[in-house]
Amino acid sequence: MAKAAVRFVCESCGAAALRWAGRCEGCGEWNTLVEELARPRPAARRGTAPPIGFVPLAGESEPAPRIAIGIGELDRVLGGGLVPASVVLVGGDPGIGKSTLLLQAAAALARAGRRVLYISGEESIEQVRLRARRLGLARAPVELAAAIDIGVIAAALERSGASLVVIDSIQTMWLEAVESAPGTVNQVRGSAFELTRLAKSAGFALVLVGHMTKDGMIAGPRVLEHMVDSVLTFEGDRGHQFRILRATKNRFGATDEIGVFEMTDRGLAEVANPSAIFLAERRGNVAGSAVFAGIEGTRPVLLEVQALLAQGSAGAPRRAVIGWDGGRLAMLLAVLEARAGLSLGGADVYLNIAGGLRVGEPAADLAVAAAVVSAATGLATPADMVFFGEVGLSGEVRQVAQAEARLKEAAKLGFTAASLPRRVARGARPLSAPEGLELVGTGHVSDLVSRFRASGRAAP
Ligand code: TYD
Ligand code: MG
């Protein structure tokens, strides 16, 4: 019999080494190498494996069949529903609402007559039942088990005929053959591999719940992202009621698609029209507020950008940002002062994206600039105007993608004007703007500032 080989694997990056070391050569982390027993397969197997068959690139394949869960926001992020025999990893901070979302998904599918198995390694049967009762799902025919032993779970799944199996969470699963504690990279990888193999052979859709570590990685770690078909991350600000589900990898659909949910005491409610919700508490005619016409995934979303300037004490002025990039705000403030002659007079600047959404698009520059200029001049932005455009270092307003989708969303929500890059408004390609929407081309941030000043003079 072949001798079991010993090797060492990094808990953080998954790199393998032959000898133990204090520091991983792959990622430079300290004390992350753990011993792994690699059991060689019996050599005889190699000889009897059937040869693989090659096929031409051109050929007909059936499109992946879909099982719609019935929660629209979740189905959209998945690309139209679950794909049988596929594996989805749902990541997110502890307490963000993963178990709630998946219990709701499991119940919806079970109510549609599918066999759904929910295996909890974290909570007891009683705890999951309590949640189900609170969510009003106690009568849904979901089959529930509390287990962590992959060997036992595998036996139950093999011929179950289930459509969906939820494992909550992968970090609690335990494989007897692997000599390390649950949650370690070897256990997580080994368990996920075993479950994935089962999903492929038995044909059920497998959803693995995974907790994220502080630095945003799914604990136990990157190796899992490569093994699964889709990675969804569930995010949101703890203090806010909104939760965003984002596809960061999807073998069966688009990435960057988002689903928006609102947290209620009866679970997660779908938000079909996020713009209306995000703008619901906006008060017009207040200085320091501007509406940004953004794109999240394939969907336009309108958001309110709020800026506040305050005369701070002596010393370096404070800049505090929620929902946007602090470095980008610093750059924009410098551009406004240097290129558009806006004087901030060393004031503290606070910036907030209302509603708790995090914006990553550079297209938000113009809306942030408008909010800051509005706060600095004390003049409100027109209440029925949206803003979008990227601002460069010389103050020029640059083109951004998907202008038409942004304008359409603005018109849909009753806005009558849009401030956008001049090259988009008057570009070579005619823009099909919605009827009744006035396009205000902005070539440079100084145009924006002078327009504010002009509106101030015109005011009574
Ligand atoms: P939970 O689903 O357990 O989070 P995770 O599985 O990601 O760790 O939810 C955390 C807590 O928030 C839990 O006590 C229930 C509560 N909660 C609500 O009250 N309403 C909601 O809509 C959600 C999503 C959670
Ligand atoms: Mg949970």
Image (cartoon, grey):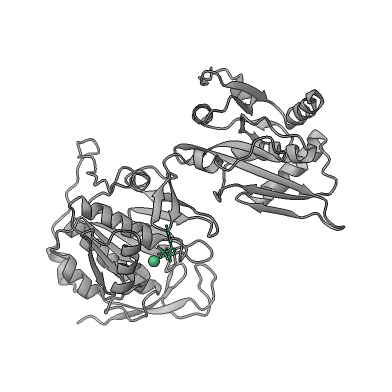
Quarter holding residue 332: top right
Residue 313 is situated, as x and y percent measured from the top left of the image, at 85, 57
Indicate left or right for 266 with 337 as reference. Answer: left
Q: Nearer the viewer, residue 31 or 108?
A: 108
Q: The C terminus lies in which quarter of the figure?
A: top right
Q: Nearer the viewer, residue 39 or 142?
A: 142
Residue 375 is situated, as x and y percent measured from the top left of the image, at 75, 41
Indicate left or right for 391 with 207 as reference. Answer: right
Quarter holding residue 98: bottom left
Q: The N terminus lies in which quarter of the figure?
A: bottom left
Q: Residue at left 36%, top 80%? A: 180
* Ligand 1 sits in quadrant: bottom left
Q: Nearer the viewer, residue 59 or 70?
A: 70
Q: Nearer the viewer, residue 120 or 459?
A: 459
Of all residues shown, which one is farthest toward the right? Answer: 314
Is residue 218 at least partly visible in the picture? yes
Residue 308 is situated, as x and y percent measured from the top left of the image, at 73, 47
